[in-house]
Amino acid sequence: MKTKAPQPVRLSPQETAFVRSLVIYEDADILALNKPAGLSSQGGRGQVHTLDELLWAFAKPGKARPRLIHRLDRDTSGVILTARTKPAAGFLGKAMMARKFAKTYRAIVTPAAPESKAGVVDVPLRRDEQGREAFMRVCPPDHPDAETARSRYRTLAEAPGAALLELDPETGRMHQLRVHLAHLGRPIAGDARYGGALVVGGHAIPRLMLHAAALTFPHPSGGEKRLEAPVPADMAGLVAVLGLSS
């Protein structure tokens, strides 16, 4: 049975200008954006359009919009990749399944840096549904719902009450970095769901302090591509005021 093509979404001039302002790279095959925190990648419940819907701003008349290759949590900012064509989407989807994508994140954690300045968290996760909400939980490897999850981390800077980490997830489980850091006893600042501090050093944390800083992947036209997204102003300001500039 053939799936029905998604119907174009009517966007306001303001929405079109907004999503175009997020572009950090584009060519004939791909389009990459720096997603702000607070914007759902897909499946939002409110009246506000998701990033997936906003991508209609880049569709040529009568053609499909760019396709999201991966997602970021609503409150995570940073690089997000789309494919402009069906062949590019197929190529990138296969590359992601083969773990040929390398993702680098930045996070502010509390109450200090991990005891080991660098390391790997190799702890399985399982999905836990509670009503309309979904959580991820650490679990034993022999749990029937266990999914392998590995995350690398490195401390970039530390100050009283907080640390700035660089994170490289080797697998792509939902909320993986958030749960792994909480498991270390170093939850991400602003992550109310997994025990993150909402005030650090007397400064209110406006949101989840997690940013997808870079993405490296094989390009559909050949070679390897690395894309970077600057840390947003709210997170950069917190890094500075907490003394975490690395």
Image (cartoon, helix red, strand yellow):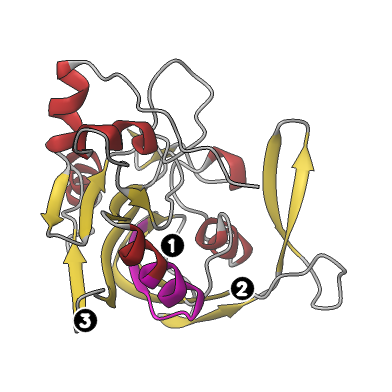
Of the numbered discs 1 and 3, the one sitting upstream in the chain is 1
Report the side of 84 relative to 137 (left or right).
Answer: left
State yes or no: residue 103 in magenta. yes
Whole-percent x, y for residue 206 in the image? 35, 32
Q: Residues within 10 Å of mark 2 (few under 14, many from 20)?
A: many
Taking the view exactly as shown, the residue that stands out farthest to the front is 1
Q: Name the residue located 23 percent from the left edge and 59 percent from the top edge.
A: 244
Identify the secondary structure beneath mark 2.
loop
Front disc: 2 or 1: 2
Q: Which mark is residue 154?
A: none
Spatial CA span between label 3 and label 2 = 25 Å
Identify which residue is drawn at 35% across, 27% down: 8
Residue identifier under label 3:
224
Q: Is residue 151 left or right of 244 when viewed as pictured?
A: right
- Give the class, few, some or many, for how many residues have Cα within 10 Å of label 1's Cα (few <14, many ≥20): some
Q: Nearer the viewer, mark 3 or mark 2?
A: 3
Q: Quadrant of the C terminus?
A: bottom left
Residue identified by numbered label 2: 149
How many numbered marks are there? 3
Query: How far across and how far down the image is residue 218, in percent?
Result: 28, 79
Residue type at mark 2 is Ala
Percent x, y of residue 199: 42, 36
Sequence-first tag of 3 and 2 = 2
Q: Which of the numbered marks, if any, corresponds to residue 112?
A: 1
C-alpha separation, residue under disc 1 versus residue under disc 3: 36 Å
Residue 93 part of the magenta segment: yes
User: What span is in magenta?
Assistant: 91-107
Residue 164 shows in this picture: no
Tell me which amino acid carries mark 3.
Glu
